[in-house]
Image (cartoon, helix red, strand yellow):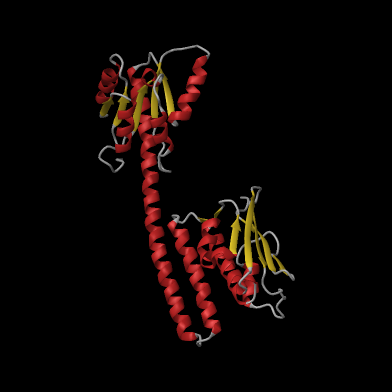
Amino acid sequence: MAGGGPHSERILILAPLGRDSEIASSLLAEAGRHAQVCTDVAELRAELERGAALALITEEAVADSDLSNLADWVSSQPPWSDMPIILLTAHDDAPSRVDRAARYQNILGNVTYLERPFHSTTLVNLARSAIRSRHRQYEARASLDRYMLLARELQHRTKNLLAVIQSIASASLPPGPTRETYFARLHALAIAQDLVLEGDGQGISIRRLVKQALNSFGSQIVIHGPDVNLSPINAQGFALVLHELATNAVKHGALSAAGGTVTVEWRQNLGRPAVLFFAWREKGGPPAAAPKHKGFGTKLLEVAVATEESPLFDYGAEGFSYEMSAVLDRPA
């Protein structure tokens, strides 16, 4: 199975000393494999960027070379790629051999060692095995491409569905605060959906979500917390929570006063399950008072995000505060 690119099936050889490159190329050609010889590490790096199925390198070619450029390429491979590399080494029982092997493993990644002298069929069979593993990586890339295509289609369909829901609500709900509140919540959900799908459907940083949701309030809101990734479902829940908290603060809380401030903080506990401790604290606004009746907004703050225990609502003289422990994952 071909990898799809014009250079995806070739073998790159870096063996500048002696006849190693000539012999290796001949052996691989007899097995029906095209090989291209590189003269130095810089050329190998450039050719790897163009595409390859396998790199064959002699230890002498890299022993005293600056491999930082090559290491940078290895570490920057896309998620589907783990370039197989065969490193030809000389027989050596010196104590330093273990340290050298560890260095090459750290720099080159997916390395298989082949010690000289070896039989020609050993090299050919090892190359075939490496290329088969590369083909599986190409298949993984194809699966990721299909996933991205489906994700983009899902994004398109989701936007259409939200537009349909808004149209139905617009025709069904009479003009007034209820309809405006509903539309605002729907808009917050749509923004979260866009951010999630911008991240390839893998979720989104809570910092980015908070900034996106609250950027219109300027210096009245201060945020503190690490860069924690939220799953798509948690991101959507947090978007609704942030919208509800900000809307209430504008109407009744700290954001209704010129000197009012809001502090948004979070921290992560990396246990099992992983938990995000989230807090919203208001100061400088009118004294907070508990609502006489639990409305939909309060219920939303209780259930929009899966939590270890019920969120805490504090209606104090200094201002309203809200805390919750959001479950980021669950044990298998």
Q: Position of residue 96 (x, y in %)?
A: 51, 15
Q: Is residue 19 visible?
A: yes
- What residue is rendered at 44% in x and 36% in y? 75
Tell me if residue 63 comes above or below residue 264 in the rendering.
above
* Drawn side of residue 192 relative to residue 89, left or right: right
- What residue is rendered at 42% in x and 69% in y? 159
The residue closer to the viewer here, 287 or 168, is 287
- What residue is rendered at 50% in x and 11% in y? 94
The residue closer to the viewer here, 124 or 182, is 182
**How many numbered marks have been drawn onto this rendered protein structure?**
0
Residue 46 occupies quadrant? top left
In the displayed orientation, state which residue is furthest to the bottom: 174
- What residue is rendered at 72% in x and 80% in y? 292
Q: Position of residue 232 (x, y in %)?
A: 52, 59
In the displayed orientation, state which residue is furthest to the right: 317
Q: Position of residue 186 (x, y in %)?
A: 50, 73
Which quadrant of the rendered structure holds the N terminus?
Answer: top left
Tell me if residue 225 comes above or below residue 186 in the rendering.
above
Residue 258 occupies quadrant? bottom right
* Drawn side of residue 289 relative to residue 148, left or right: right
Q: Position of residue 122 (x, y in %)?
A: 37, 21
The residue closer to the viewer here, 220 or 321, is 220
Tell me if residue 289 comes above or below residue 172 in the rendering.
above
* Drawn side of residue 155 relative to residue 220, left or right: left
Q: Is residue 275 visible?
A: no
Residue 125 occupies quadrant? top left
In the displayed orientation, state which residue is furthest to the front: 259
Tell me if residue 317 comes above or below residue 201 in the rendering.
below
* Drawn side of residue 190 relative to residue 275, left or right: left
